[in-house]
Image: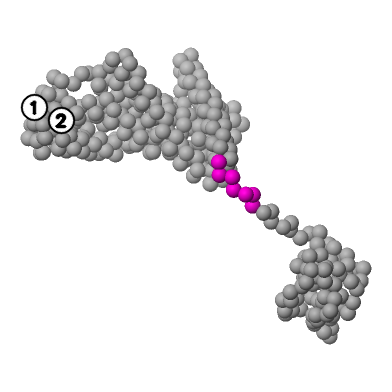
Amino acid sequence: MTPAAHLTVTDDGLRLAGSLTIDAVAALPFVPVAAGAVIDVTDMTRMDTAGAWFLVDLQNRAGGAQIIGATPVQAQLIETVRANLAPPDAAPPAPQWLTQRVSDFGKDVVAAGQTAKALLSFLGQVVAAIAGLLWHPRRLRLTSLVHQCQQVGLNAVPIVALMAFLIGVVLAFQGSAQLRQFGAEVFVVDLIAISVLRELGILLTAIIVAGRSGSAFTAAIGSMKMREEIDALRTLGLDPIDVLVVPRVLALMLMLPALGFIADMAGLIGGAVMSWIDLGVSPAVFQARLLSNTDVWHFGVGMIKAPFFALIIGIIGCFEGMNVGGDAESLGRLTSTSVVLSIFMVIVMDALFSIFFAAVGI
């Protein structure tokens, strides 16, 4: 039986003898090696890959020590192991805070510009497909449209109505607490009517729909993209825009105004109930004040915004779904992106509408 390797410290460096195999390497002690030392392997009888790696490691720790006494076969194995070692980890670059921040900002701006360009292109395709239905109405998938109307509209009525009712309650309670200081509690009716009809009713409804239906659009279309069903549609000669996107966008544009109307009514009812409980404003007084002092344009402004909010939510939700890759990670990431981007764009559009209506005096 070949004796196991043993290591001896000499005046010039180290001497290895015996069988330098994986078992022997594990048993050898750690010996510090001086720079420029000589590793003598003349008496080494056997060596495997682990032994060759051990010698290369010793040589590197000694700053390039010289290995002497190796047979040609051993020398070839040592060189093979050295050539296949992983390169050393590069030192991390010195932190450059300002440069890195400017670079990251530039990359974000470029990415945002590319996304905006792709979104506009996608919007153009959808608008062209919807316009084409005027000349070819038989291309409209009525069954899919009705199904999507149920999903995004009818099924969302409870959560939208409850949210709007609670918003009306909160507005009445908070408004009365402030107006009571001036003896102007009756003006809480005007506060609730203008806030709910003009802004909060449709805005909060759009935010709920973006989180509920926009994410569902992305998840549904993204799942089809992952399973290559969209490629199958194209193979069959069907346009995914006509089959998947147009019914969803049209359903949102039809149902969001209806949901906004329900939210307005629920918000007014919530405000009326809280005004009656907290201020003693009876429903009859609330109704009279509402009809006499609230311009119909407050309601009209909210309804004008609804189709535009619906278009934004539908386009972004379907666009992100079409961009899903082949893995579940991209599906989750783009679903989250769809919700965040939809809510952000709805708020931006609401701000632009507010500026526009203020400019035209409505």
| Up/down of 45 relative to 296, above or below | below
How far across and how far down the image is residue 175, in percent?
17, 34
What segment is highlighted magenta in the picture?
92-98
- Residue 358: x and y, percent? 31, 18
Which residue: 54% across, 32% down? 109
Instruction: Give the residue type at disc 2.
Output: Val
Question: Of callouts 1 and 2, which one flags the residue occurring earlier in the amino acid sequence?
Answer: 2
* Label 1 environment density (alpha carbons within 10 Å; few <14, some 14–19, many ≥20): some
Q: Mark 1 is on which residue type?
A: Val
> Which quadrant does the C terminus fall into?
top left
Relative to 166, is 134 on the left or the right?
A: right
Residue 165 visible to an observer of this rendering: no
Percent position (x, y) of residue 308? 39, 24
Q: Position of residue 227 (x, y in %)?
A: 56, 42
Question: Magenta stretch mostly in which secondary structure?
Answer: loop
| 224 vs 120: above or below | below
Left-right relation of 342 to 70? left
Relative placement, left or right, of 4 versus 361 is right
Per the image, the residue denoted by label 1 is: 285
Compare residues 144 and 6 and report the one nearer the observer: 6
Tell me which residue sits at (56%, 44%) in the image. Answer: 97
Which quadrant of the figure has residue 183? top left
x 78%, y 72%: residue: 34
**The N terminus appears in which quarter of the rendering?**
bottom right
Q: Are marks 1 and 2 in contact (CB under 8 Å)?
A: no
Q: Of helix, strand and loop, which one carries label 2?
A: helix
The residue carrying mark 2 is 188
Q: Does residue 266 appear to the left or right of 307 in the view shown?
A: left
Picture quadrant where residue 141 is located: top left
Pick the front one: 300 or 58:
58
User: What is the distance, in whole Å, between disc 1 and disc 2 at their CAs?
Assistant: 12 Å
